[in-house]
Amino acid sequence: MRSMHLALALGVLWLAAACGAGTAAAVSGGGGGGGGNSPASIAGFRVLDANDSHRCRVEFALRDPNGDPATVEFLYHVPGQSEQRITRILPVVGAPSPPTNPATLPSSANGVEYAFQWDFAGEASLPHDGGFVEGASVFARVGNAGELLPGANVHSGIGNDAPVVLDASAPKAAEVAGITAVPFTVADTSGDAISIRVEYDVVGDAPDSGWRVARPAGIA
């Protein structure tokens, strides 16, 4: 009688539907114009691909009724810590990006659109392996004392952990014929869809055939 060992392998399937989603928001500040001018504001501020493992995309539009330049600053917040200035800003193709943070940028009455890549895995207070941080968020403000505006994010944090298979077990019977159930639990902090591959090894076979992919018969 031969015994069998069981293994499960899994890989992440990135959900395109999660990318590019988010709601728009706007905040006013004191960075535009002077005297009796209306203040500049940020609109359409959102964080995309926040469930990536190293980088996300930040988009916003800078508005000012008089088209005056305005100073914008971006910060991130990790639960239990104070807000910190974002330092890892990278340009994107197809849209102007802030060259520094903070940066004084052109505006218009209808809004000048900007975007940049945030290499969050390079920030001092976030995991350098890009691991998921529950509740981490991105903020922006216009001017030195403007109101902090959170970027719209469809996820509850930033980063991504590898999925984990829990409680996987081989059939309890010493010998199995036909279809058998393989119970297991899978968890992922970002709630990504995943793919599962079940493998088995016949112990004691000669010559050793190694691990083989099990043929699926459905999911219960």
Image (cartoon, rainbow, N blue to C red):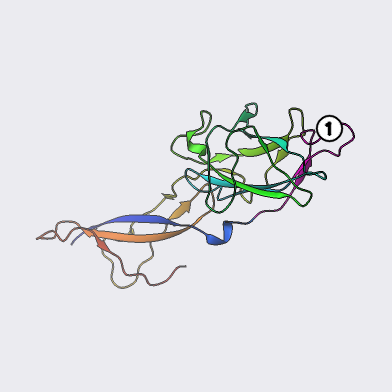
In terms of secondary structure, where does tag 1 sit?
Answer: loop
Q: Nearer the viewer, residue 78 or 205?
A: 78
* Dot 1 crowding, Cα within 10 Å, few <14, some 14–19, many 20+: few
Q: Where residue 76 sits in the image (x, y, percent)? A: 62, 34
Residue furthest left as drawn: 207
Magenta residues, dominant SS class: loop
Q: Magenta segment: does it hold 183?
A: no
Residue 165 versus residue 154: which sits nearer the camera?
Answer: 154
Q: Position of residue 39 (x, y in %)?
A: 82, 38
Tell me if residue 93 can be seen.
yes
Residue 99 found in image quarter: top right
Compared to residue 18, the image places residue 215 above or below, namely below
Residue 204 pos. (x, y %): 14, 56
**Which residue does the numbered mark 1 point to in the structure image?**
34
Residue 46, visible in the rendered structure: no
Give the magenta-colored segment's residue range. Answer: 22-42
User: Taking 145 as reference, is 20 left or right?
Assistant: left
- Residue sitting at 61 percent across and 30 percent down? 85
Image point 61% across, 33% down: which residue? 101
Amino acid type assigned to the residue bearing label 1 in the image: Gly
